[in-house]
Image (cartoon, helix red, strand yellow):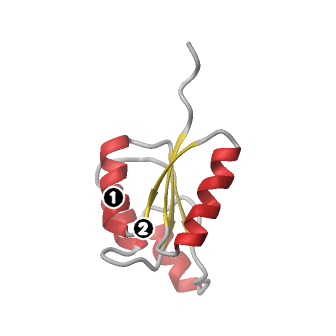
Amino acid sequence: MPAKKTTIVTADDDPQLLRLVARNLEFEDYEVLTASDGKQALELIEAHAPDAVLLDVMMPRMDGFQVCQQVREFSAVPIILVTARGQDQDKVRGLDLGADDY
């Protein structure tokens, strides 16, 4: 019986970037679930209990900070916030909300 693939949820509102990240992860033999907004990402995380999460910060319906905060209420899954926003206060906020890396 083959081993279960590591599952990663990745969320970004830029469809091209989302597709690029997903394809690269799939190439490395990960199972990838994609979301185009924060609410959809949260639903995928709740439903599939992934092994890791990659979140864009600036997304519609629910931003990455909100998703991170809500996920921490029920899961310790590793979360990496991936964003162009590089101000120190954003990094501190993300890490304070429970992200594992920024």
Q: Where is residue 70 in the image (x, y as percent from the top left)?
A: 30, 61
Residue displayed at 36% across by 65% down: 67
Residue displayed at 38% across by 41% down: 49
| Residue picked out by circle 1 | 42
Rendered-image quadrant of the N terminus? top right
Relative height, residue 84 to residue 73 (above, below): below
Instruction: State which quadrant residue 17 falls in.
Output: bottom right
Residue displayed at 60% across by 41% down: 30
Amino acid carrying mark 2 in the image: Ser
Q: Position of residue 78 (x, y in %)?
A: 51, 51
Relative height, residue 31 to residue 92 (above, below): above
Amino acid carrying mark 1 in the image: Leu
Tell me the mark number nearer the camera, choosing from 2 and 1. Answer: 2
First in sequence: mark 2 vs mark 1: 2
Badge 1: residue crowd in 10 Å (few <14, some 14–19, many ≥20): many
**Left or right relative to 39: residue 88:** right
Q: Which of 99 and 54 is in front in this view?
A: 54
Q: Distance between the residues labelled 2 and 1?
A: 11 Å
Q: Where is residue 56 in the image (x, y as percent from the top left)?
A: 50, 71
**Left or right relative to 54: residue 38:** left
Relative height, residue 1 to residue 52 (above, below): above
Residue displayed at 35% across by 51% down: 44
| Residue picked out by circle 2 | 36
Instruction: State which quadrant residue 2 falls in.
Output: top right
